[in-house]
Amino acid sequence: MIRRLCFLMVLLWVAGHAGAQDLPALRHDIDTLCSPYFAGRGYVAQGMAKTADWLSARFAQLGLRSFTDNYQQSYTFPVNTFPGNMSLQLDGRTIPAGTGFLVLPGSRSITCNDLRIVPVDLSKVRDEKTWLQRCAKMGRQEQAAYLLQDIDVAGKAMGKSREQLLAGLQRGLYLLSESGLPLWSVATDTLPATVLQVYDSALSSSLPRRITADIESLFVPHFRAANIAGYVPGREQPDSFIVITAHYDHLGKMGREALFPGASDNASGTAMLLALARFYAAHPGRYSIAFILFGGEEAGLVGSSFYVAHPLFPLQQIRMLLNLDILGDAPKGIVMVNGKAYPEVVQELETLNRMDNEGRSSRTYVPEIRLRDNAPNSDHYPFSLKGVPAFFIYSVGGKGFYHNTYDEAASLGLENIPALSSLLKQFISAQQQ
């Protein structure tokens, strides 16, 4: 017992000093994952496959053991993609893809030349019957595109989300006027319609009257993806695991030019996982530590849900799971999702946060540790449903670019992230008792 405690104290000391050394590697890995070669780690130009192969090679380079022949666990799922043409002109003015407009992820292909735009006032729509009648009327007039005004007002009156309303649209071209920063996502099915979200920053002061568009979509019913899994065997109890996870996928590209780099979401969490894997490959603990990178998170926690249904080792052998998602800047600290359900774990993390590398009370590694109830907002969630003590940590602060083309590597300051790396290493090492 004394020997084990001495080893743990040494490991905690080493962990506390290792964070600052991670900064160059974190920056390099984020820059690499956000490079055009990986095409946004998504669904066109083999972006996700290239990333999976690169990460598998990194696991091998770090010396992690593999549960499979090549670190990969393959699966398929349906996804709507946008691999080709992506152009929009309003009143003869070109609107840039990604910044000026987005295609609703479930949209179909469409090509049109100089169609008139008909504004449709939805502010008086109060029931589903009236909405469906409007949809049918618009669907019968193919020589026009429709600018849907006040759709959120109608949705609120009907108690329906925007997505539920748009699912009722018939084949045709529809426009939505949006404010704020673009926000894109992934769809695993298709709509009958093509819906373009045009942002105020790209519009003139008057409503557009004519539209020319060329939108190419491709529905892939069996898109092939992979989880990447490796582990460091424990010195004393190799059949018990501490698990560190992150998702490596992002949104990919919308057409040939609009690239969604996904620096914060989640090249940052992937880079942090690689830093932790590098540390524990050199400093194995009492228990095994597994490192799992999931694909398909942006499509609805696909990779983690598949893993839980097809685990590479029994879920009952997981002592704790820590999921890392969005760790680009932490000037205001971190949030621990599902922490409220495990107060003793949170107390341990908060105690370590207040200690310096010598184990004395000192300034904190991160300014604050906030808690949230469990939620299906990242890859910890499918594990928590199976009774695994699973937590999701994300950082608070920074520029906050999310699901848009501005989430670039250069936008991340990595403020307090090396300190967070030290804290995570101490926390994980403390679980080796």
Image: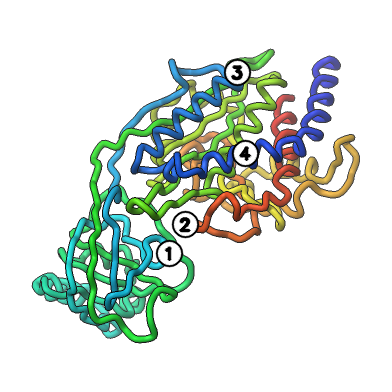
Inspect the image, locate mark 4, and give the three-letter code of the amino acid beneath it.
Answer: His
Q: Secondary structure at mark 2?
A: loop
Relative to the observer, which residue lies in front, 382 or 249? Answer: 249
Q: Is residue 377 visible from the viewing direction of this image?
A: yes
* Residue occupied by mark 1: 99
Q: Earlier in the sequence, mark 3 or mark 2?
A: 3
Q: Residues within 10 Å of mark 4 (few under 14, many from 20)?
A: few
Q: Which residue is mark 2?
A: 405
Residue 216 rendering spot, x and y as whole percentages: 24, 54
Specify few, some or many for label 1: CA neighbours under 10 Å numbering under 14, 14-19, or 20 or more. some
Residue type at mark 2 is Thr
Residue at 31 percent of width and 60 percent of height:
104
Q: CA distance from mark 2 to mark 4?
A: 20 Å
Classify residue 139 by image quadrant: bottom left
- When the figure is inspected, residue 25 is found, relative to residue 259, above or below; the finding is above
Q: Is residue 274 left or right of residue 206?
A: right
* Foreground of the two, 381 or 262: 262
On the image, which quarter does residue 141 sit in?
Answer: bottom left
Name the residue furthest left.
Answer: 140
User: Would you say 344 lies left or right of 217 here?
Assistant: right
Instruction: Assess whether mark 2 and mark 3 are in contact (beta carbons under 8 angstroms).
Output: no
Task: Residue type at mark 3: give it.
Answer: Gly
> Is 341 displayed left or right of 353 in the figure?
left
From the image, tell me which residue sits under label 3. 63
Secondary structure at badge 1 equals: loop
Q: Which residue is mark 4?
A: 28
Q: Are marks 4 and 3 in contact (CB under 8 Å)?
A: no
Which secondary structure, mark 4?
helix
Quarter holding the C terminus? top right
Q: CA distance from mark 3 to mark 1?
A: 41 Å
The residue depicted at 68 percent of the width and 54 percent of the height is 370
